[in-house]
Each structure stands twice: as structure tokens, then as C-alpha cells.
Amino acid sequence: MQRGLPMQPTVVLLREGTDTSQGNPQLLSNISACLAVAQTLSTTLGPRGMDKLIVNERGEAQITNDGATILKLLDIVHPAARTLVDIARAQDAEIGDGTTSVVLLAAQLLKEVRGYIEEGVSPHIIMKGFRQATKLAIDRIKELQVTVDKSDPDNFRSLLLKCASTSMSSKLIHSEKPFFSNMVVEAIESLDPDDLDESLIGVKKVPGGGLQDSLLVKGVAFKKTFTYAGAEQQPKYFKDPLILCLNVELELKAEKDNAEVRVEAVSDYQAIVDAEWEIIYRKLQAIEKTGAKVVLSKLPIGDLATQWFADRFIFCAGRVPAGDLRRVVQATGGSVQSTCSDITREHLGTCGVFEERQIGGERYNIFEGCPKAKTCTLILRGGAEQFIEEVDRSLHDALMVVKRAIKNGEVVAGGGAIEMELSAHIRKHALTIPGKQQLVIAAFAKALEIIPRQICDNAGLDSTDVLNKLRMKHATDGKWFGVDVDGPTGIRDNMEAFVWEPSLVKINAISSASEAACLILSVDETIRNPQSEGPNPGPKAPAGTTQRALRGRGRGMGRR
Amino acid sequence: MSAPSIDPNSAVYTTDEYGRPFIILREQGRKTRMNGIEAIKSHILAAKTVANIVKSSLGPRGLDKILISPDGEITVTNDGATILGQMEVEHQIAKLLVQLSKSQDDEIGDGTTGVVVLAGALLEQSEALLDRGIHPIRIADGFERACVEAVKHLDTISDRIEYSKGNTDNLLKTAMTSLGSKIVSKEHQQFAQIAVDAVLTVADLERKDIPFDLIKVDGKVGGSLADTKLIRGVLIDKDMSHPQMPRDVRDAKLAILTCPFEPPRPKTKHHLDITSVEEFKKLQSYEKEKFQDMIQKVKDTGANLVICQWGFDDEANHLLMQNELPAVRWVGGPEIELIAMATQGRIVPRFEDLTKEKLGSAGIVREVSFGTTRDKMLVIEGCPNTRVVTIFVRGSNKMIVDEAKRALHDAICAVRNLIVDNRIVYGGGSSDISCAVAVSRAADEIPSIEQYAMRAFASALESIPLALAENSGLSPIETLTEVRARQLEESNPHLGIDCNGRGHNDMKQQFVYDPLISKRQQYLLATQLVRAVLKIDDVIKSGEADE
């Protein structure tokens, strides 16, 4: 199926319509695709990075600056470009931050070696070079990283604050950095230090109010559930209450579907009615007897039960979302009960204070001072839903960074400083290597410069100028010099300016970027089966171009 | 046909070595993309358009909008949040503005128009700055610094006002400022009084908590706005179940039931096979017995009024009538709850549980009818829990009633805000002008590019007094410059736009009060929104499904 050689006979090997592309051209075209994707992301990097507004088919809009989110929303189908999406996701899952950098780096690595591929250098030589360079880079990071002394809590806390605020600097909440970084660190500190299970940090979003009105609840909070008449008569404030969590439906009609009764005589009628009431009353009484003052259930609590509890000064909430209930159980102790009988004290949880509070336009049930697991809830406020969504994503990144920092406690300077240093280091090393590897490793060094370069470009600085200054600094002794978007010279010592990032973020970013680049380089043929396009006729691109773009689709054969 | 292939709007466009275009994204051809300055400019345009729509409804002389929903329902309003909420805007950035005004509404309840006008003005100013080549984020940073200055300045020009249960003058004035621009301005005084009374009745002044659930606003078409009144109790849109039942019950003891006046039926699926005549008669007598039994149970507790969530059939109705037990049926859940709270009764789920202690009490329960219509409503007054109030709005047509309700909501919110935080600033644009002056003064001391953005912020702040003056039929620029000059000259931050033509500009003397938190929130929210808009440089939009 080589075009441009019309006289050759065609050997039909694969099914008609199968899309095959191979060889170097395929490799180059994959590289171009990755570059196109990275291009889209590039403007989001750094403290002056911009956001993307992405609208899906249903007209829902998302505004985001998070690399992984953007890639997910873009809905990329190109197979090679999908690799980039995967590494961004992996970075997100593993580290939670640095998703944009990893994609940019991978794309830049490819871009740098593109020329060599065109000249016929074997991809394997390039891959080998990359691996070597990656190892060099990681070793250098480990050598340079600054370990912070955990024994001094004040010092350590300020380190965490700095890491959190570096992670936030490119986001919408940039201007509220001190406020939010404090909040994030407090949230993490309230967790169990051995485990740091961030799923115990609940995030609730309440539209309205300003970003500054966001708050951290040291305990569990969830939105007031749907209640029946009578709920307003229940007490809304308890000190040291016992908390019972149920998975039981407390409604009169509970047995509706499970049984059918044949009534023989009229006199039995009342007996059955009474029996039914008896069932639910017995449940309610059993609950009351446990001494619980707050009753939560995953399933509905009906109006009858609501009023019954109101009569006895017990608070109840039905249809509590499963996740919230789980956090309540973990925080207050106790366990979720599936029956109302045989509940003893150890099944009940407790907390310091329970109350229902107004937050913005909504009422929240808040449990504070929980004895068991350490947990907390972030209540985010903001002018619009998209805002809050983005704040949520930004805080997630920051939380993850802080978590990593606590676990490892080693940091490097951000703002492109570590990349410049690595670049200088690797370049120096490259000169000692004979052969083609030298070129490849030098290319790797050059690719690392994309991070500071892009930060400069996004900030409207002259990147060539700034990079030259940085190279000069790193060639001498300024190993922590990075980009400064605010200052007049454009460079500064980012270690002293407290632009810190956990070194793990960088290690992971560099190794996964180079792995992704290697992966893409090792592909030289794509075979796409026609079936995948059969039921779904694929993109309706402009006529003429699509035909060629999708090569084949029934016509691939006859082209001689 | 090579032209469409190089569509610059297409999402991500590249060609490979052979000049074949890539398909990178799903449905790539349908996605449109806009980026860079072009995207920002188009957002600014959209935001400006929205702001211009609501601009003319700002201030006491602001005009109303008529909005017609798809099913032909008409809303007349000048409440910013309502207008935007009902416009069903499509544009994403415009939607953000709608949410902005909604969040001001949720949080503060008032000043929803102002916040949109301010955000629109800020974006308009930033357009000029973008043209000068200033980086959008630098602009946003500058705005934020300016906002901090403005909020700080608001604190310094604010005044604390005193209020108490007895001294409601100042609260009244705030309510009147909020009502000033609304349709009810004819009955200004009365509505303000109602709003203040309602809030003070339910407010817990010590905890500064105002449970809005306890204020119920109900409306009925007919009468005039002047007939609107505050009922210290509960009003329900129901009447006695039997026309011959007494029209009013004094010293009522209420049995509040959530079970129907019917023989109880098991909820489990059941069958009753009647095989003989005796059986049938037995059933009949059983039913009758049950009815009597129920009524007896109610009577035994000493109740003289039954409020029932469900219905009851004619037979029960008749029996109730005979036993002189007035009853109300089909009372909705929330109303039942409100009645229970007001009368301090308990909601009883079945007759067996009915006891004397569970009854609610009320001074008087009466049925009121209106004009020549046969509509009746039930008023429950003199309740032991005096913290439940109902505002009953009258008006000549539905639109007016609805608008009056919204106006009252705004006024109630304004009063609430004052109780929560008793600091005020003076309205009529005076605080905006004063902040504008303060911000531009601060701008001069800043060495970096943000200076420009701060100046722009100052001129955006002036858009509120400008709109006020324009809407009041004054020459906007002339008035504004005069007031600003006088503010500086007399160093009196209380000078504003004289919208009502009182002949002087001192808002303190005109008693135009705005709660401080409302103004503060306007500045903060608008600045945050503008930051979000300026930060977007890339829009990727999936095409319509039916394209």
C-alpha cells in the first residue's frame, strides 16, 4: 500500500480497510501528534500560566489549569498521543502534582530527537541514551536534594507550607496562597501521621461566598439530608452524643414487598395493622434504648420515625451518602449496623460536638472533636461552580504534595531551577561520552530546559535572555537559580525564595516522561483494525481530508 | 476542497510528513477552539453584554425587565439574580456571571445587580489594558491588590449603627434602601416595617442567628400592595373541611395528625375475602366503629381543632361535624411542621399515640376570606412560639405579587445582614466613589505594572455611580465628577449620587444605608470572577450534537 509507486502490484495481507502506517514516517507522525497535544498544555505552566475552558457536548463547562484534567477532557483518540494522557494520569495518581510538566517534558524529549530520527539514527540508540540520561538526572537530584529536619516541628511546618504554596502558584487560588496553604497543611496534620490516608479528607462544595470564606472543619461534615416533617423539632446541638449509624430503613412500609397477608376475618384486620406498627416501634425503641442521640442511616428514615425521634429529643438523618457515613464511622468509632437489635455500646460512636450549622445557603451537619480516626472536611466556597471545582483540583494537588513532603521530607527548588541544574549537569557529562550517545544525552539536557523556558514564555519574559542568564549561573555556582516572574532580572535563587517542591515529584516526572518518550520511539507501526471504526463512523472531519487521514475505509485497495 | 481542511478554528490541527492531517481528538472536526487574546476578548464582550442588560435596573430609578419563559409565563422584575437566572444564557462566560449574581444572592441576598455591573466594568477596563500588551495575569494581580485596598477603605468609611428591639429606625432605613429600587417603592415604609418586624421576631439577637425557615412569605392576587401584612403566626391556604364548621376557634387546642381519618390499613399487601353477608355487615360496622373511636380519641384529649396531613371522606367529615370538631385536611408537610413549631404541638402519626401533651395551642384560629372571591385561608395566631411569622403579600396581579415577594426577600436579607454585622456604608455610589479615590491614590505608590490595573479598577468602581446617575436621568459624567470633586474637597466620603432628587448629595442625611458585608462581598466576588475570566486563554468547545 505504498502510495506514489503506482506500478507495483499490491499484495493483500491484511483485511481490507485496515490502517497501517509504518517505519520512520510513522514514528515522526507520532511525534508530531504528541507535540500538538503538548502545545495545547504548554500555556498552563507556571505562576503566569493560563486556564483552559473546555465545553463538552452537553454544554457543561470546566475551567481548569490541571494538566491531567485538561488531557482527560480533551478526549484524545490518537494512539500515540494517548500515551501522554496516560503518563499524566499516572503522575496524578502517584504524586498528584506536576502533571503538566511531565507531558511537556515528554513531548520536548521527542522534539529534540526528531532531527536525529529524520537523519536515520536508530530509535534504540536514542532510547539507550535517554535511559542513561534519566539515571544521571535522578542521581543528581538525589545528590542535590535538601533533607529537612523533621524533628523541629515549626521548621517542618513551614517547609510544608512552602511546598503547598508552590503547588498552588499556577492556579486560580494563587492570590489566596497563604490562606489555602495553611488550610491544606492543617488538613494533612489532622490525619493520622502513620497512614496519611487522604480519602479521609472530605471535600464539600458550597456555592456562594468568596474563596476566603472556605473553611476547614476538624471532623466530618455533610449536607443536611432530605428530611420529613418533624425534623425541625429535633434538637440540633449535642455535646458528647452517642452516634448510631444504620443501614436500616425506618419506615412503616418497610415490609411492603416481602409479604402478602390474607385476612380471613374482619377482626384480624386491626391485629395486622397493630403488628405492622409493632415492627417499626420495636425498632425505634431498640434504637432509643441504646442511648444514641444522633441516628444516621444510609436508607431513608420516614416521617413517622422522624417525629418519633423528635419526641424523644434524638436527631436523625436518613439517606446519608455512603461515603459520608463511612467517614462518620471511621471518625467517631462504632460501626454501621444492619439491624436494630443487639446494639451495644461498642457499636456506637461518639464525638465532641454535633451540630447543624448554616453555611452559605445550606445547612450542614457537623461532627467535631472525633476521638477515633483523625479526619477533617474542607468546605470550599466560591462565586461559581466551576470556581469551586477548580479550587478542589488545585487543593488536591497541594494535598498530595504535602503528603509526599511529609513522607519523604526532601525538597528541591522549583521554578525551573532544578531542571536547569540537571541540564547543566547532564550536558557536562555528555561531553565525556564518545559516539552518538553524546548527541542524545545532550538532547535530553536541552529538553529539560523546556520547563523554565515555558514558564518565561507564559509570564511574558524574554525566555532566551533569561535562559542564558540561568545557564551562566548554573555553570558557575548558583545551583538553585530559577525563573523569577516578578522580579526585574527574571532570575533568582529559588531555594531562598521558598519555591520548593518535593524531590519525589521531579524524580517521578523525569522518569515517567523519559519512559513515555522511549515508548513512543519504540513504536514504528500502527495497525488499526477496521472494526473499531465500523459501528461508529468516526470523526466527521471536513470532506477530502478525512478520507486520506483515515486511509482506507473501503477505498484503500483500489488505489493503484 | 482543501480550504476547510486548514480550518484555523479546528481543535488541534497538525499535519504529518505527508501533509495528512491528524485526528488527535475525538470528533475533532466538530470542536472549535479559540485561544490567546482573541479568546479573552470574546469573553469580555460576552460579559459586557450581560452587564449592560442589567445595568439599567440599578438604583432607585432603575427600570424593570419583563421576562417570558418558554411556557409563556411572565416575570417582571428588577432583581439582578432573577433576571439573569431566567434569561437562560448560553455563553459560558455569561453563565459565570449568572452564577456570580446567584452566589451574591445566596450569601447576602441583596446587591445582585451591582456585582454584575462591577464585574462587567472590570472586564471592560481590562480590555484596554490588554490592548496595551499587559499580561492578563498581571492585570488580575493588580485588580486583586486594588480590591484589597478597596475593602480596607470600606472598613474605614463604614459606620456602626445601633439597633435594638425597640429602636428599629436604622434597620428600617436599610430596608428602605434595599426596597428603593423595587416595584413596592410606593409602599416603601410599610414594606420596610414588615421586613424589619419579621426579622426581629424570628431573630436570636444573642447568637445573631436568623432562621429564615421561620419566615414564610405567602401571596395572593387581589387587593393592593398596601394590604400586605405581617401575621405573627401561620397562614395556610386551606379552609375548614366542612362549610358549616365554625369560622374561628378561640383558645384552640390543635391535634396535628399525619394519618388519615380512615380505618387503618396495613401497608403490607393484603387480601380480605368477604364470603357472607354477615361478614360484610361486620366490616361495615367495624369501619363505623373505627370512625367513632377515632373521633372519641381526639375528643378525649381535649382537642378542638384537627389539622390533618391527609384527607378524609365525607362520612368522616360528617361525623366530625356532628361531634363539633372542626378539621382542616390536606395540609402539606412543611406547613404541618410550621404549625407544629408555632403551636408547640407534636406531630402525631396515629390515633393511639394521641395524648393531651401532644396537642398544640393557639390563641385564635380563624378563616379569612377575601373580597368577592370564595377563596379562604386559615390564620393561626397567638401561638406560644412567637418566633414564627408569615408575610402575606397582596397585589393586583401575579407578577406584582411575585416581584413584591422578591423585593421583600432582598429587604429581609439586608436587615439580616445588619443584625449579623452592624456596620454600614452609605449607598448612592458614595462608597464606590470614595473607594475609587482611595485605590487610585494607592496605585501611585506602586512601582510595578500593577499600577495600571489598579487605576483601571478605580475607574471600574465608578461605573456604579455612573449607572445610578444615568438611570436617574442625570448627566452621568458631570454628576460623577462633581461629586468626586466635592468628596475630595470636603473630605466627606458620604457624598453620593442624588437619585431621588432631594437636592443634596449627603447620603448620610438621606439615610441611604447599605450593609458593609454586602458591598465587601460585591468587590471580592467580582474581582475573583474577573481573575477567572482573564486566566482563560483557550476555549475548546465540542460542537452541538445536531450540527
Image (cartoon, rainbow, N blue to C red):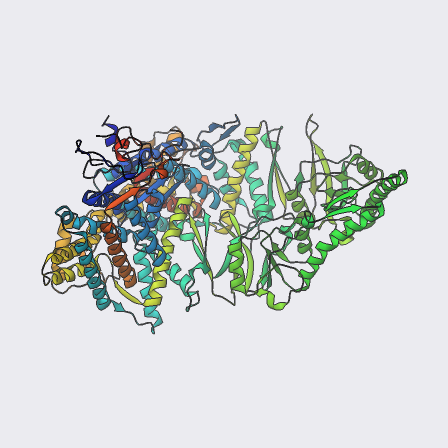
Task: Report the front residue among B306 and A328.
Answer: A328
- In this image, A458 relative to B406: left or right? left
Residue B445 visible within the image: no
Q: From the top left corner, tell me how far across and down residue A128 is, in percent.
A: 19, 58
Quarter of the image containing the N terminus of chain A? top left
| Residue at the (23%, 30%) spot, across then down | A559
Task: Report the front residue among A109 and B288.
Answer: A109
Q: From the top left corner, tell me how far across and down residue B269 is, in percent.
A: 73, 44
Against A442, residue B532 (above or below) is: above
Which corner quadrant of the image does residue B21 belong to?
A: top left
- In this image, B133 relative to B286: left or right? left
- In this image, B213 relative to A540: left or right? right
Residue A398 visible within the image: yes
Which corner quadrant of the image does residue A491 belong to?
A: bottom left
As drawn, the residue found furthest toward the bottom would be A151
Task: Report the front residue among A488 and A26.
Answer: A26
Quarter of the image containing the C terminus of chain A? top left
Against A181, residue A547 (above or below) is: above
Q: From the top left corner, tell me how far across and down residue B464 is, in percent.
A: 37, 37
Task: Report the front residue among A198 and B492.
Answer: A198
